[in-house]
């Protein structure tokens, strides 16, 4: 093995194709997009070098700041919900349902494999007001709360909560399975020793289970934050970023800027901002987990 690792020809044959593919598929587009940030225009109208103008525009663009804030609060709420509900479900599977949890796990996991557009259309029908009332408005009307009947997806505040609820419901089954695999790997001897020492219920979960589950919980948070910061399809299918741009995250704003308005340079600058945001969140989670581990 050591002889093989010293042979550059063997390294080139085994690693070279994968490295070349990685470079062409990932690194070249990143470098290309980074170069676009110094230009304005489109492939049809042509490009013009503008230096750091696109970066200065970020500080003066209210739509960018609004999209950045929307994406940040959406990621904080949805990631917390996905991992928290996933953890509660995993504890339910491991300590209460045990072997009989297979059916529940399958049912909770089912939304994960459903197409996002289908799930979004389901929620559109549930909260519809026209051409006929959806489930929510029908229930409100039937219990005499006609004044509460409204276009839930036509208002930014209520649409935000509906999008968040949909994405938490859709993905919590994935995190439940991920955390459940960590729970079943905790040695039964460790749990039994903790029980003999008097740890039961919440104290067992807080002082034994959660610390042992910390690496998978951190990985879940990183997966979730990076996924929710880059949310695109669920919002596009549910509200299209509206009403107005009330539910437009950075990804959707970047897409519209680049492909609807043909501003490739500024769209690439928005994409770079999103990449930096994802990197900072990941580093922050790692930093916090290391600090807590050192305490």
Image (cartoon, rainbow, N blue to C red):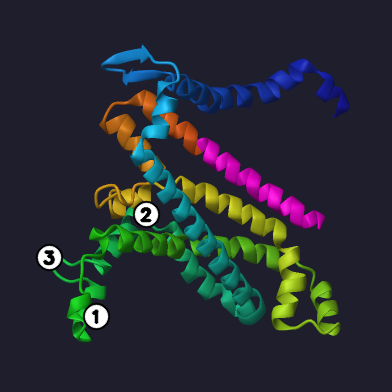
Identified at 54% across, 42% down, the residue is 278
Q: Which percent across, then down, holds residue 107?
A: 47, 70
Residue 113 got which mark? none
Q: Which percent across, then down, holds residue 143?
A: 22, 86
Report crowding for label 2: few under 14, some 14 to 19, many 20 or more residues within 10 A (C-alpha): many
Residue 131 got which mark? 3
Left or right of residue 186, residue 86 in this image: left
Identified at 31% across, 18% down, the residue is 43
Instruction: Say whether disc 1 or disc 2 marks the residue closer to the N-terminus.
Output: 2
- 268 over 12 or under it: above or below: below
Residue 139 got which mark? 1
Q: Which residue is mark 2?
A: 116
Residue 60 is a magenta residue:
no
Identified at 75% across, 20% down, the residue is 10
Instruction: Say whether disc 3 or disc 1 marks the residue closer to the N-terminus.
Output: 3
SS type, badge 3: loop
Left or right of residue 51, residue 118 in this image: left
Contact, mark 1 vs mark 2 (Cβ under 8 Å): no
Magenta-tinted stretch: 275-295
The C terminus appears in which quarter of the rendering? bottom right
């Amino acid at each position: 093995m050591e002889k093989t690792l010293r042979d550059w020809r063997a390294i080139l044959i085994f690693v070279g194709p994968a490295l070349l593919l990685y470079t062409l598929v990932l690194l070249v587009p990143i470098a290309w997009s980074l170069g676009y940030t110094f230009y304005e225009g489109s492939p049809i109208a042509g490009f013009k070098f503008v230096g750091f103008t696109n970066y200065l525009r970020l500080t003066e663009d209210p739509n960018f700041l609004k999209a950045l804030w929307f994406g940040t609060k959406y990621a904080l709420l949805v990631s917390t919900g996905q991992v928290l509900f996933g953890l509660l479900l995993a504890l339910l599977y491991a300590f209460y349902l045990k072997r009989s949890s297979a059916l529940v796990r399958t049912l909770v996991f089912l939304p994960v494999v459903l197409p996002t557009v289908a799930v979004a259309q389901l929620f559109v029908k549930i909260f519809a007001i026209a051409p006929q009332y959806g489930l929510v408005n029908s229930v409100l009307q039937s219990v005499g709360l006609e004044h509460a009947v409204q276009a839930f997806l036509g208002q930014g505040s209520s649409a935000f909560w509906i999008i968040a609820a949909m994405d938490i419901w859709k993905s919590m089954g994935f995190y439940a399975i991920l955390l459940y695999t960590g729970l079943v790997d905790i040695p039964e001897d460790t749990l039994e020793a903790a029980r003999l020492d008097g740890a039961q219920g919440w104290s067992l979960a807080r002082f034994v289970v959660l610390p042992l589950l910390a690496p998978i919980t951190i990985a879940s948070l990183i997966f979730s934050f990076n996924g929710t910061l880059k949310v695109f399809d669920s919002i596009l299918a549910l509200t299209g970023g509206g009403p107005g741009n009330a539910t437009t995250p950075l990804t959707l704003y970047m897409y519209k800027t680049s492909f609807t308005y043909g501003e490739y340079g500024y769209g690439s600058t928005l994409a770079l901002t999103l990449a930096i945001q994802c990197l900072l969140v990941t580093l922050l989670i790692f930093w916090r987990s290391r600090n807590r581990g050192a305490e």
